[in-house]
Image (cartoon, rainbow, N blue to C red):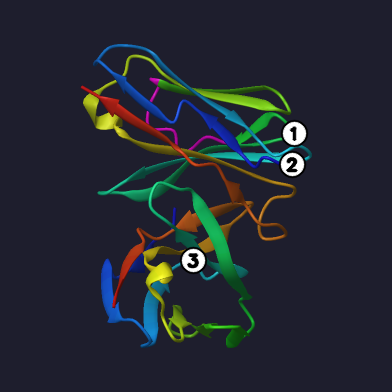
Amino acid sequence: DAGVIQSPRHEVTEMGQEVTLRCKPISGHDYLFWYRQTMMRGLELLIYFNNNVPIDDSGMPEDRFSAKMPNASFSTLKIQPSEPRDSAVYFCASSKQGVPMDEQYFGPGTRLTVT
Amino acid sequence: GEDVEQSLFLSVREGDSSVINCTYTDSSSTYLYWYKQEPGAGLQLLTYIFSNMDMKQDQRLTVLLNKKDKHLSLRIADTQTGDSAIYFCAGNSGYALNFGKGTSLLVTP
């Protein structure tokens, strides 16, 4: 399997623009997680899905952030409008079952820079 | 989420042992994990320990858990330059993971 695929790997955008990050989980995995990594706050869970349904979005910073999972093989994280403080590395991860029963597999991340 | 605290940096010489420490506050975590992140890459599971265990050994890695003090440590024996990375401690919180900020390990020749 190719592992978790994320695109783009790098994104540079101007403040106020819409940004869409994409993730393809490992085939057969029922759980999908979105994380954000910054120097100040470390690795934070934003939202996770089970069988395409959002289960916990309490980590989503504010209404500017939204996430969807229209099918088992694709998820998006959208920021509209983007702000400089959104600059971070965004990771997608998937697992066959939720922890603790199963390992989470991480994608390579999308480095977002908002100027 | 609950707090997971780690020291930020550790530097060791090649061949020495490394010990990375972590404290956590969520006593409901049934598993505790160590993940490794190499530069420019995602996180990769190194090892984990069930919360009713005190110790787990996996080749060069030894995990010690003091549940009373909520303290977890990862010992890497015979540390190599390829072990230079960021190491994250995490506990399960429901079906998700709660991570510490990570410890940057630098291994010098």
Residue identified by numbered label 1:
A51
> Is residue B27 rendered to the left or right of residue A11?
right
> Which callout, 3 or 2, points to the residue nearer the camera?
2
Front-most of residues B66 and B78: B78
A114 versus B45 height, above or below: above
Q: Are marks 1 and 2 on the same chain?
A: yes
Residue B99 occupies which quadrant of the picture? bottom left
Residue identified by numbered label 2:
A29
Q: Judge whether residue A36 is colored magenta.
A: no
| Residue B66 shows in this picture | no
Residue identified by numbered label 3:
B26
Amino acid marked by disc 2: His
Question: Label 2: chain?
Answer: A
Q: Residue at x 28, y 28 (%)?
A: A113
Quadrant where the C terminus of chain B lies? bottom left
Gap in angstroms between the C-alphas marked 1 and 3: 27 Å
Front-most of residues A81 and B102: B102
**How busy is the neighbourhood of tag 1: few (under 14 within 10 Å), some, or many (20 plus)?**
few
> Is residue A15 rendered to the left or right of residue B23?
left
Residue at the far top in the pictured view? A17
Provide the residue span drawn in magenta.
A56-64
Tell me the element at label 3: loop
Amino acid marked by disc 3: Asp
**How busy is the neighbourhood of tag 2: few (under 14 within 10 Å), some, or many (20 plus)?**
some
Q: Residue at x 44, y 80 (%)?
A: B73
Tell me the element at label 1: loop
A53 versus B104 height, above or below: above
Q: Are marks 1 and 3 on the same chain?
A: no
Tell me the element at label 2: loop
Question: Label 1: chain?
Answer: A
